[in-house]
Image (spheres, rainbow, N blue to C red):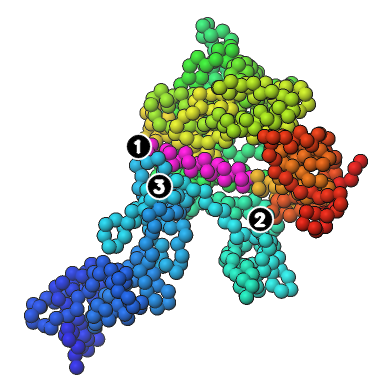
Amino acid sequence: MQRPGLTARKSPLLGNRIARPILLQDDAVALRALDSPLLEGPMPRIPQDDTEKLPSLPSREAVLDAMANVPGLDTKRDLVRHFGIGGSMRAPFRDLLKQLEGEGHISRKRRTLRRAATLPAVTVLDIPTDADPEALYGLPANWSEDEGPAPRVSILGGKSARVVPGPGDRILARIDAGDGSIPVYTARPMKILDKPRRGQIGIVRRDEEGARLIPVDRKQREMRIHLGDLGEARDGDLVEVEVKPSGRLMIPRAKVVSVIGNPASEGAVSMIAIHSLEIPYRFPTAALQEAEAAKEATLSGREDWRDIPLITIDPADAKDHDDAVHAEPDSDPSNPGGHIIHIAIADVAAYVRPGSALDREAYLRGNSVYFPDRVVPMLPERISNELCSLKPGVNRPALALRMVIDAEGHKKSHSFHRVLFRSAGKLAYEQAQAAIDGRPDDVTGPLLETILKPLWAAYESMKRARTRRGPLDLDLPERKIILDANGMVSDIRVPERLDAHRLIEEMMIAANVAAAETLEKHRSPLVYRVHDVPSEEKLLALREFLGSLELSFQAGDAVRPEHFNRVLAKAEAGGKSHQVSEMVLRSQAQAEYSPENYGHFGLNLDRYAHFTSPIRRYADLIVHRALISALGFGSDGLREEDESRLVGIAQHISATERRAMSAERETVDRLMAHFLAGQIGARFTGRIAGVTRAGLFVRLSDTGADGFIPASTIGEDYYRHVEEEQALVGDRTGEMFRLGDTVTVRLLEVAPLAGALRFELLSEGTRVNPSNFKRAGRSPSRTYKGRPTGRTRSGGKAPPSGRRKK
């Protein structure tokens, strides 16, 4: 017997008769909305009173309302019964449920269906890294898989927005679900949050019972991995794991979810930081394709500067060269002793267009990240090392600055130009300096009289202007790690600070200032490089510390870099340079990017923007685009929609800069720990680089490696952490260990993967009157080290003394 609502027709292919539904007109409209395959071919239409009443497909709103308000609708069968779905409606109703599930309105666990949880009024959202910056959306950060697919939340922006996030950001946002019964979520960002680092990463160590996970984070503990949970991981592999409690005692157990690589075999300790901090290091196909398709720039729309012999001066191992310099005496009689300086910066904007795949990836990375064993570049090598690298003897596009200075280094005028030029030479810092010092080689010899000496003459004038300006003179040594063929440390050096370094630095500062001045003159929005004045709290801590060293810090209401320079000079004269330099550094605010200008305190400049390194910093690319737009240099400048995003861009690239600094520092720590792993028990000289109630941080003099001395291992006394002195002071003995003190230590323990060292203190501290640190107004925290009786306060045995008297 044929079912109601079905008629029979003959199949043109099979020759037999098959059933086809006859639908009422309203049903047909509902199915067409679902793109149902049932609607292929012409739709039969019959009057309603010519057939019995058929159930219609319920609306999306009706389904969601029933699931929210009618008890017992837990499965698809329950919903079918509730709505009286029969026969021909079953397939379209199943499609409707799948659509609602795919949109995140319904969650499924096995056979159970339920309406997905709604988002709270304020929630945390993660913006995918591949999201379109011009149509951002986010997903709830704490969404459970049991709730079904996470709802997609459109992120609102605009020129009036104070918080403007970008791809890859985590934000706190105010949520609006709309007025309908089906939520249509939008979000207004309230704050950009720091994303928690990927914590579940470690090295697999196989053993008889399975394997252990050795964490790369020194704050995490080892975990067991059962053989069945290892996947394809082998001994020594760096892996990502998920952690689940197991057994009656709920002991954490790790399960490998992905194999990242093997640091030992690849000689890449930096991989740990790259993955734990989630630094993008593989370029998407679209970005690589754009880079490969890029054509070399021509003279069209540019000035021809190929007759100006600019040269590059960089580190000897540099692979990309984004700045070139030239100077010549000014022939203008009104400017005796003056110079004309030309500075050319790689025109990255010519290849990385706004909104392109290259642009999105460059924004996501924010900057290049430099490790001792590798570079994670902001741009693909085709752009950074080829088309934009200012190699000698080849045509290269540039944004260039022509600047006139007088004999005292004061700038008289400047102008920007979009040019094509050809570098006349590629020199290393040491090579250029050697030529000036009377030791030219085959490359620098022909350049000495015509190029190098005029450059140094211009620098001498600029140096006088710098002295008068008085930037913060905090010149701390930087160590360079030399790696062997296996990617491990073979040597550590402190490169000599040369005039060649200072020359390039001073010319780049001048170019950055000129860029900011030009954009301000044209009322163009830009991203400044800003460095705030030290806070009152940090200044107070510095004054108290300097007072303990019998040094005064004289500054009025308006503190300036010269105030710090004076005290640094006094400290150096008194043999206290290390202590004071460390504290002056700690008193400084952190430099960042901002569309709001509040000056650069450290450089003592009213306005400053990063313009000179667009190959490795997105901030510089933004400034280039702003100059292109402001000066009418082309159509590839800053767009109007980009101007409204500058707040978010500045926040994002400030965060990626901090991430890069953390990654570089952690990698150096791990490399140092590997380097020292074979020297357990060796003695070293170092300086106290940090003081906390938990103990002392010591930086070794030879290598710069940092390690920790727990307070409980130093000796037998009660120690007070005296914050204003940056010291630990013995309650009974008055023995004091202070920031900057020189100490002798013994290496006791090394954790190479975590980059951690533990030392034993062998030196004695200075002796002071302990009662001086117990008077009113001082409430330092106490840190236990032990007692002469050998008993602790709780009655347990005191730890053994960590040092002996000389």
For label 2, count other residues whose C-alpha is less than 10 Å away and answer few (under 14), some (14-19) or many (20+).
Answer: few
Q: Residue at x 38, y 26 (%)?
A: 523
* Mark closest to the chain's N terminus, 3 or 2: 3
Part of the protein shown in magenta: 639-664
Left or right: 362 in relation to 493: left
Question: Residue 508: image x %, image y %?
Answer: 56, 27
Question: Residue 615: image x %, image y %?
Answer: 53, 38
Q: Residue type at mark 3?
A: Pro
Residue reaching furthest bottom? Answer: 1
Which quarter of the figure has residue 158?
Answer: top left
Membership of 649 in magenta stretch: yes
In the picture, the disc for residue 189 is 3
* Mark closest to the chain's N terminus, 1 or 3: 3
Q: Secondary structure at mark 3?
A: strand
Q: Residue type at mark 1?
A: Glu
Viewer-side label of 1, 3: 3
Viewer-side label of 2, 1: 2
| Residue underneath mark 2 | 219
Relative to 634, say whether 41 is above or below.
Answer: below
